[in-house]
Image (cartoon, helix red, strand yellow):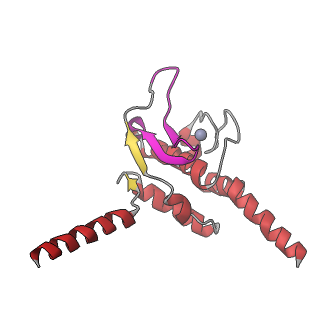
């Protein structure tokens, strides 16, 4: 009897761990991710499936932070080329505006299917941001622009139009 209870407990625990499908999210990034998901809801963009494709969203100290080579955030891919991790440089923690811009930038790569829109300008999806504070000051417009010009959003609009046309 005791043995079967043990076995049962073991089975239940392994089922639970398998079905958990947990995404490891750094607690300092979680509120920013929640905020990003609020915008996804506003623009009717589904984020659940993409969320569970991820293993983790972490703050790391392994990204370069040199004078001529600084990477503040990055999406990492598995061997099939699918994004499975988002990493943010610990240096962004010095300023919450920078952290938020960098996090939204990386989230947009994954959840909104963005490549970059320009090399060097003051918008969230620029490859190089010259002023994080200009973006922060213009935040609402910046976010609206980022969502409404994103590949995911434009595809949805296109699909909606096509299905209207075929009706
Ligand atoms: Zn980027």
| Count of numbered circles in the view | 0
Q: Is residue 155 magenta?
A: no
**In the image, farthest residue toward the left:** 2
Residue positioned 55% across, 59% down in the render: 50
Q: Position of residue 96 (x, y in %)?
A: 42, 46
Q: Which of 88 and 84 is in front in this view?
A: 84
Q: Where is residue 15 in the image (x, y as percent from the top left)?
A: 33, 68
Q: Position of residue 126 (x, y in %)?
A: 64, 39
Q: Is residue 82 magenta?
A: yes
Quadrant of the rendered image holding ligand 1 = top right
Is 159 positioned to the left or the right of 52 in the image? right
> In which quadrant is the N terminus drawn?
bottom left
Q: Position of residue 73 (x, y in %)?
A: 49, 39
- The image shows residue 122, relative to residue 39, as above or below, that is above
- Tell me the magenta residue range: 66-92
Q: Nearer the viewer, residue 16 or 145?
A: 16
Residue positioned 45% across, 27% down in the render: 64
> In which quadrant is the C terminus drawn?
bottom right
């Amino acid at each position: 009897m005791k043995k079967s209870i043990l076995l049962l407990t073991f089975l239940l625990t392994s089922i639970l761990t398998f079905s958990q499908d947990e995404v490891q999210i750094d607690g300092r990034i979680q509120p920013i991710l929640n905020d990003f998901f609020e915008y996804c809801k506003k623009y009717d963009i589904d984020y659940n499936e993409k969320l569970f494709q991820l293993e983790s969203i972490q703050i790391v100290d392994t990204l370069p932070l040199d004078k001529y080579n600084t990477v503040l955030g990055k999406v990492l891919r598995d061997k099939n080329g699918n994004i499975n991790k988002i990493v943010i440089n610990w240096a962004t923690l010095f300023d919450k505006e920078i952290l938020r811009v960098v996090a939204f930038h990386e989230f947009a790569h994954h959840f909104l299917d963005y490549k970059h829109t320009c090399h060097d300008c003051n918008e969230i999806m620029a490859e190089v941001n010259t002023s994080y504070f200009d973006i922060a000051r213009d935040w609402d417009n910046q976010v609206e622009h980022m969502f409404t010009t994103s590949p995911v959003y434009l595809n949805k609009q296109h699909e909606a139009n096509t299905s209207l046309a075929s009706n």
